[in-house]
Image (cartoon, helix red, strand yellow):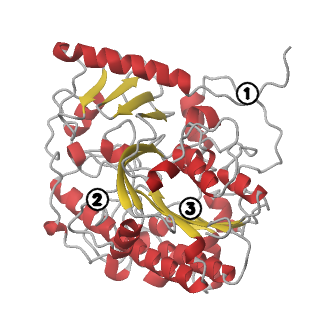
Amino acid sequence: MTQRPNFLVIITDQHRPDHTGFGGNAVVETPHLDGLAASGMRFDRALVANPICMPNRASIATGRMPSVHGTRYNGIPLDWTANTFLRKLREVGYHNGWFGKCHFQNMGHNVQVADHFFGKAPSEDAVQPRYPEGWDRYEDDARHRRERVTIPKDFYGIDEVELVVQHADLASGHYYQWLLEQDVDPKTIRGPQNALPYDAKWNQVWKTAVPEALYPTSYVTDRSVAFLERQAGRDQPFVAVCSYPDPHHPFTPPGRYFDQYDPEKIPLPETFDDPHAESMRHLRRMKQNPGKQLAQMAPFSPTVEQYQEMAACEYGMVSMIDDGVGRILAALDTSGRADDTVVLFTSDHGDMFGDHGLMLKAAMHYEGCIRVPLVIRSPGRTPGVSRSLASSLDIAQTLLELAGADEFLGMQGTSLVPLLDDPDATVRDHVLVEEDEMFDLVGNGQPLRMRTLVTEEARITIYRGESEGELFDLQRDPSERHNLWNDRSRAALRNEMTARLSQTLMEYADDSPRPLAMA
């Protein structure tokens, strides 16, 4: 490339890598994503820093662990002054656009929920930032439904922002105001109350009345295409982030995508009937109550019929995204800037989606939740497949290195650029995964805190306040069926992994800010 490369970053929401054709799925149709994967480097062992939306999206942007950047779970906005790869690229001359779901800030402001779980805690935090009034309300769902929200010029380093807030056909954001501009009243077409007739087997599946052309996926595609069209003929390098809110539940693919897949033809995952004899008690509870979900966002154990219906609808959402990706890549080609553009595709986290008879996410660090698709197509580099461990943390440093821009102190990832030149190389031998929640999801009377270490050989997961944990030998048991935590014959593996996790937790302590002097 003769200049700094452009970057086209495509992000999906709650999307497993094996819910694509290139990821090995024989049912879902994703020809454009498959073509992208075939023309780039595919990372088959890419894992998240956190399997929840806000924390991992903030980690993608900052290259820092959630316990360090501060967005430990959904509900804590990313610090207004946090450094991001977008800010660093803008400093060296990039023009940045973000289209779709961002989720660096809260989409809802139900303070009663937080008060319920933290009512006995002190009312003030240790750090009291003095930011402008309303700095954390730019992604507020209710606000976007009331007014067209003007985003400040430096929104975490982004110049142009057109937001989709929330998921599926319930989305708002700038998208909601755009619907009004089309002389469409969103209240008359969105949600289950306006859905077309359909006998659903789960309350988060409905046949949306929103037409394909007005569905959030089409809006994200249209705005991304328009941005790329504006870049034609320009010399300034750009970053375009195309961030789809699908295929996150609820599952509401519009039009032809709703009926594209027959639920009865979707096979069950091989671990669907996992008895969880050696599992943590919160997993056993879910498995013992199939078809029952305690709350809208809570994980649960689906029946066969529920699983197949959800998979069919989710596949429809994925195929609609794939068609959008095809349009975006075509617009990039038409712009004349494809030869100077790095294309990256990933997701913010996965979903159990029937693995081990479980659904959704939270308090589960099986591969279904923590592994994500990751493809990087860099012009002039040979396509391939890397089996090296990689982390969502690594994306920021990879993009900065490709742009010839310096990383900032406190970044905790590892650049994947060496793997773009040699897929047989290895850049890391472990990945740390964090998860904190404000809820007690295990049943020990305190908010969940989990830490997981994944190596080439094994996975270990520990829970705050629990003497039990998880240990899997990934060489002998890649599908994570047999928890070895209490297996005395594997005590050496447990000791080794516990020691490595302890060292890793120290390794990921914050190095920022830098010292100013010797006191």
Q: Which residue type carries mark 1?
A: Glu
Q: Is mark 2 on a helix, strand or loop?
A: loop
Write the residue at 78% across / 32% down: 128
Q: Mark 1 sits on what residue?
A: 124
Q: Residues within 10 Å of mark 3 (few under 14, many from 20)?
A: many
Give the mark, 2 or 3, whose residue is nearer the N terminus.
3
User: In the displayed structure, would residue 62 be above or below residue 440?
Assistant: below
Q: Can residue 511 be seen?
A: yes
Q: Which residue was labeled with disc 2?
A: 202
Label 1 packing within 10 angstroms: few (<14), some (14-19), many (20+): few
Does residue 515 sit above or below 64 in this rendering?
A: above
Q: Mark 1 and mark 2: span between their CA atoms?
A: 41 Å
Q: Pick the quarter of the image with the C terminus.
A: top right
Q: Give the class, few, some or many, for how many residues have Cα within 10 Å of label 2's Cα (few <14, many ≥20).
A: some
Q: Indicate the amino acid at tag 3.
A: Lys
Q: Which residue, given by chain and number where applicable, does mark 3 sit on?
A: 101
In depth, the one of 39 and 101 nearer the eye is: 39
Choose top left, top right, bottom left or bottom right for residue 153: bottom right
